[in-house]
Image (cartoon, rainbow, N blue to C red):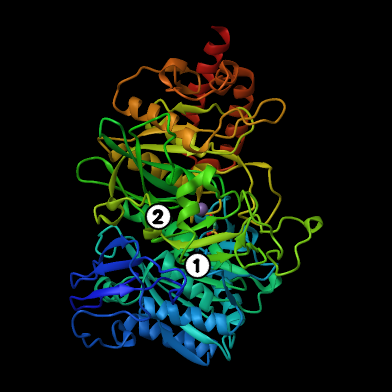
């Protein structure tokens, strides 16, 4: 909660993550008016000069120390302190002054570099250890009493064994370091759909990231004290030794223990560990869905707004789609970002599915971000942004592959840039920035009720087989379509890049329990909805025989989304194929876009031979889940196979 006003009505003029306005470049400021319940409403006011410290329009209220707000949290912090033996304990209030102080400290200690304040005011660079640059799926475990509950999709360890192993690693691990306590809320602070956690970490970099990525600090702890329930996340960077690195999840205890990595999804425990792995488990027992999905609002030229949620694997363009800029040839469309990575979807009293974004910031892939691919993101990350593992120019501007200008002189490891040693910026280099910096940030993103979802979209990175878009026959078929997602691997996780793997619902690395039970849960949630979203599958990454992309992607993807909305509103028919419903070419708005007719035909083609093989692969994959697999999914495979036979015959 940047700019949180405590319990008194107050007006803050707050500074960003960075601390300190550059005299050369006056900065805009977030003006946050509090209503006394921590529901600050923020407006971006360009041209306002940021102040060094928050200013209050009324006297500061007397606040009780954070350590006294929740007995359960304090007891846990005390037990962790005794185990890890830090030099000091610091409870995070979540104020801008505190972020500024942490930033200054990291600069003093040489962990952060201030970037050129003229061009990148309030921006900093962090370099991680070179062997700690991505999620480590092979060291990530789900620790449930029964191995079957974790399922073949997860690494499993017995909870007793895992706790013992972690206890050994955590013993005395924070000696000489500060222990940070970060209470956080995933989702709008006043939303009944939100859930809270507390992360304990010995990394100031992690604390700083968490303050941008979540609503962190006092209001979260106040809510925890009221709710009485929270996820316990314990993190230490240890010695950053890849051989002493584990990311353990205990969904039955609502607990996470992470050791040996300071990077992204391994260490910012609110993100993948809590909001996906633990939350997916919580969601099953409470009747909702925690998904690896962006949420975007689309306003048509007629003024009709629909929200859609889309699941793609990491580094497949979720942030770009969430911040899409309509092409000039599609006038009148507006796009609003609700979230770029995670959606919590709840059946509402009206029979629709309602979504919140549990996060408050973006931890996005930097390479490839430029004015052509994502002008919003490009503008957004020019101030108050924390960069991790990008390169530098001679005048300390951040540089990454895909920028139209600038010359890298220092690579992401801080060495003199030498192209023979690989890219200047790490392919998984990241930006951390508050969602409020996003020019397309939806005002509905802070709505405690969430937004109603008209369509769910699955997608992967596939050179072939999957057409540009198709619609599932109905919800159960949509669950099969989601369960069958396959994608080429990316740099977001350690391992080989570019190999096709099954990534059901883009949740392979993130589902906190057995996929078979998860698909059953999906079927059950759908059965309860009376106004179900339609389900679609897209593939922006189809290539021709020469390896060239057939579809331009980025802003042009709006044409495909517009077709989906036409389908949701019942305005256009669709072509039945064995695999689902495809657009008739005349129903895709191609005005102002030059895609050759042959390419469009290829993009919308369903090859029955390739698809029969694909269905056989999917069946073999699903059968690995044995008797827990819902029979409905096998029935859906059969329906598709019959449809493909008819297609081949007709
Ligand atoms: O898991 S991270 O948060 O590091 C990024 C991703 O894989 O989406
Ligand atoms: Mn992600």
Percent position of residue 57, x then y: 20, 79
Percent position of residue 100, x then y: 44, 78
The circle drawn on residue 268 is: 1
435 or 358: nearer the eye?
A: 435
Mark-to-mark CA distance, 2 and 1: 21 Å
The circle drawn on residue 287 is: none
Please say if 368 is above or below 308. below
Name the residue located 61 percent from the left edge and 69 percent from the top edge. Answer: 246
- Please identify, in this view, whether the residue under mark 2 or under mark 1 is nearer the observer: 2
138 or 444: nearer the eye?
A: 444
Please say if 278 is above or below 353. below
In the image, is 154 to the left or to the right of 477? right
* Residue 352, picture quadrant: top left
Please say if 617 is above or below 247. above
Please say if 32 is above or below 407. below
Q: Is mark 1 within 8 Å of ligand 1?
A: yes
Dot 1: within a 10 Å radius of its alpha carbon, few (fewer than 14), some, or many (20 or more) residues?
Answer: many
Name the image quarter holding the N terminus.
bottom left
Name the residue located 62 percent from the left edge and 56 percent from the top edge. Answer: 428
In the image, is 454 to the left or to the right of 176? left
Dot 2: within a 10 Å radius of its alpha carbon, few (fewer than 14), some, or many (20 or more) residues?
Answer: many
**Local secondary structure at mark 1:** loop
Name the residue located 45 percent from the left edge and 47 percent from the top edge. Answer: 517
Name the residue located 79 percent from the left edge and 60 percent from the top edge. Answer: 418
Quadrant of the picture in which ligand 1 is shown: bottom right
Per the image, the residue denoted by label 2 is 438
In the image, is 25 to the left or to the right of 297? right
Name the image quarter holding the C terminus.
top right
Percent position of residue 307, x then y: 33, 41
Q: Is mark 2 within 8 Å of ligand 2?
A: no
């Amino acid at each position: 909660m940047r700019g949180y006003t405590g319990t008194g009505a107050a007006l803050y003029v707050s500074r960003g993550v960075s601390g300190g306005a550059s005299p050369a470049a006056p900065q805009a400021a977030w003006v946050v008016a509090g209503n006394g319940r921590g529901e600050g409403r923020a407006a971006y006011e360009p041209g306002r000069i940021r102040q060094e410290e928050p200013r209050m329009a009324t006297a500061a209220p007397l606040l009780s120390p954070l350590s006294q707000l929740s007995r359960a949290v304090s007891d846990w912090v005390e037990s962790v302190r005794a185990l890890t033996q830090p030099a000091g304990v610091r409870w995070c209030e979540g104020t801008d002054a505190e972020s500024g102080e942490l930033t200054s400290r990291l600069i003093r200690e040489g962990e952060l570099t201030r970037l050129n304040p003229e061009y990148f005011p309030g921006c900093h660079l962090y370099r991680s250890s070179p062997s700690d640059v991505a999620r480590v799926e092979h060291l990530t475990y789900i620790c449930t009493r029964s191995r079957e509950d974790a399922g073949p999709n997860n690494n499993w360890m017995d909870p007793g064994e895992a706790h013992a192993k972690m206890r050994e690693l955590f013993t005395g691990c924070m000696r000489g370091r500060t222990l940070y306590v970060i209470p956080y809320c995933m989702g709008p602070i006043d939303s009944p759909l939100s859930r809270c956690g507390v992360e304990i970490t010995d990394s100031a970099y992690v604390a700083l990231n968490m303050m941008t990525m979540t609503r962190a600090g006092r209001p979260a702890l106040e809510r925890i004290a009221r709710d009485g329930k929270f996820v316990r996340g314990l993190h230490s960077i240890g010695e950053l030794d890849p051989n002493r690195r584990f990311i353990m999840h205990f969904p039955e205890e609502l607990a996470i223990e992470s050791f040996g990595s300071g990077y992204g999804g391994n260490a910012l425990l609110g993100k993948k560990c809590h909001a996906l792995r633990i939350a997916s488990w919580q969601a099953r027992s409470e009747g909702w869905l925690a998904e690896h999905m962006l949420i975007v609002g689309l306003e048509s030229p007629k003024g009709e707004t629909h929200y859609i949620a889309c699941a793609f694997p990491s580094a497949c363009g979720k942030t770009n789609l969430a911040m899409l800029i309509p092409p000039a040839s599609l006038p009148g469309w507006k796009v609003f970002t609700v979230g770029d990575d995670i959606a919590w979807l709840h059946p509402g009293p009206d029979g629709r599915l309602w979504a919140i974004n549990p996060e408050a910031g973006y931890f996005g892939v930097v390479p490839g971000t430029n004015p052509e691919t994502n002008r919003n993101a490009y503008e957004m990350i020019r101030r108050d942004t924390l960069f991790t593992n990008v390169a530098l120019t001679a005048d300390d501007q951040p540089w990454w592959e895909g920028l139209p200008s600038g010359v890298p002189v220092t690579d992401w490891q801080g060495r003199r840039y030498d192209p023979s040693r690989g890219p200047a910026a790490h392919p998984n280099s990241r930006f951390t920035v508050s969602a409020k910096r996003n020019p397309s940030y939806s005002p509905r993103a802070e709505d405690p009720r969430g937004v109603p979802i008209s369509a769910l979209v699955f997608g992967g990175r596939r050179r072939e087989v999957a057409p540009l878009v198709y619609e599932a026959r109905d919800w159960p078929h949509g669950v099969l379509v989601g369960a069958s997602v396959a994608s080429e691997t990316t740099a977001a996780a350690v391992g080989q890049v570019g190999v096709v793997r099954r990534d059901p619902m883009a949740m392979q690395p993130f589902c906190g329990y057995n996929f078979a039970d998860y698909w059953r849960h999906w079927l059950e949630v759908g059965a309860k909805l009376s106004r179900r979203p339609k389900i679609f599958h897209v593939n922006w990454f189809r290539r021709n025989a020469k390896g060239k992309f057939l579809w331009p992607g980025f802003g042009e993807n709006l044409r495909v989304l517009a077709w989906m909305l036409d389908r949701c509103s019942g305005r256009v028919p669709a072509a039945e194929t064995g695999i689902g419903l495809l657009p008739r070419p005349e129903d895709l708005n191609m005005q102002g876009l030059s895609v050759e007719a042959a390419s469009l035909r290829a993009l919308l083609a369903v090859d029955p031979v390739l698809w029969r093989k694909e269905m056989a692969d999917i069946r073999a994959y699903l059968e690995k889940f044995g008797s827990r697999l819902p029979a409905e999914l096998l029935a859906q495979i059969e329906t598709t196979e019959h449809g493909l036979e008819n297609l081949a015959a007709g």
